[in-house]
């Protein structure tokens, strides 16, 4: 209820989206920072998909949630992602930037909120099979991130040590017009 009231002060309307994000945020906080449940059952990860036209407050809802919970938020424009091995940003770059944004604190990075903006563009129909295959490769890479996989990355290109970001406790909020 407190989360919902906080979101109401930051975004006008969007009652259904605010309710869904508030619930997911509460469960995320309890999973990552709360007391164990009475029978030691683990709460399941709940990602959120918010759809609506441009400018309706989708991104602001996610930012306001992160501010209220005191959790780091990372916003990625998924329309700019490339598959691993291609030139351009990929999920390894996302993992590195989340870790760097959290001051190289892996525990903090692994409990953050990641907003996948422009997520609807991932399913857009391409002009040829090459474009469709390219997007499918990006979606496959993102699936590991969204479902709770471990993403290896290096701090910089020739870094001797590989870091590993476990995304199983990261709250994913996907946004788009659909």
Image (cartoon, grey):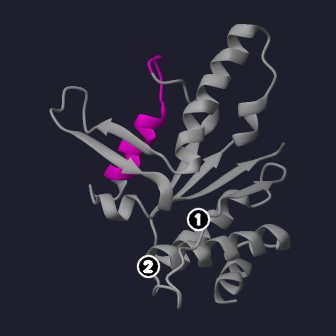
Which range of residues does the magenta coloring cover?
85-100
* Magenta stretch contains residue 156: no
**177 sits to left or right of 32:** right
Residue 44 position (above or below residue 29): above
Coordinates of residue 89 in the picture (x, y in percent) = 47, 29
The residue that disc 1 covers is: 63
Q: Which mark is residue 33?
A: 2
Coordinates of residue 150 in the picture (x, y in percent) = 42, 45
Instruction: Judge by depth and name the residue closer to the eye, 63 or 49.
Output: 49
Instruction: List the single residue furthest toward the left.
Output: 160
Residue 23 position (above or below residue 90): below
Residue at screen point 41% across, 36% down: 93
**143 sits to left or right of 175:** left
Q: Element under label 2?
A: helix
Coordinates of residue 156 in the picture (x, y in percent) = 24, 33
Q: CA distance from mark 1 to mark 2?
A: 19 Å
Instruction: Judge by depth and name the residue closer to the eye, 157 or 142.
Output: 142
What is the magenta segment's predominant secondary structure? helix
Classed neighbour count for the residue bearing mark 2: other residues with Cα under 10 Å, few (<14), some (14–19), many (≥20): few
Residue 151 position (above or below residue 85): below
Q: Which mark is residue 36?
A: none
* Magenta stretch contains residue 97: yes
Instruction: Judge by depth and name the residue closer to the eye, 4 or 34.
Output: 34
* The N terminus - image quarter: bottom right
Classed neighbour count for the residue bearing mark 1: other residues with Cα under 10 Å, few (<14), some (14–19), many (≥20): many
Residue at screen point 80% across, 11% down: 127
**Upstream in the sequence, badge 1 or badge 2?**
2
Residue at screen point 63% across, 18% down: 134
Q: Quadrant of residue 20?
A: bottom right
**94 sits to left or right of 132:** left
């Amino acid at each position: 209820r407190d989360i919902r009231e906080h979101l109401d002060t930051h975004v006008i309307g969007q009652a259904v989206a605010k309710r869904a994000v508030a619930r997911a945020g509460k469960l995320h906080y309890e999973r990552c920072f709360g007391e164990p449940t009475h029978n030691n059952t683990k709460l399941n990860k709940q990602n959120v998909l918010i759809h609506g036209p441009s400018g309706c407050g989708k991104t602001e809802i996610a930012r306001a949630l992160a501010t209220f919970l005191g959790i780091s938020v990372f916003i990625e424009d998924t329309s700019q992602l490339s598959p691993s091995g291609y030139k351009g940003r990929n999920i390894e770059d996302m993992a590195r930037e989340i870790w760097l944004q959290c001051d190289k604190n892996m525990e903090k990075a692994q409990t953050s909120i990641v907003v996948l903006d422009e997520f609807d563009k991932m399913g857009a129909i391409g002009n040829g099979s090459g474009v469709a295959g390219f997007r499918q490769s990006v979606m496959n890479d993102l699936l590991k991130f969204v479902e709770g996989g471990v993403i290896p990355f290096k701090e910089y290109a020739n870094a001797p040590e590989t870091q590993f970001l476990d995304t199983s406790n990261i709250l994913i909020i996907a946004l788009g017009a659909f």
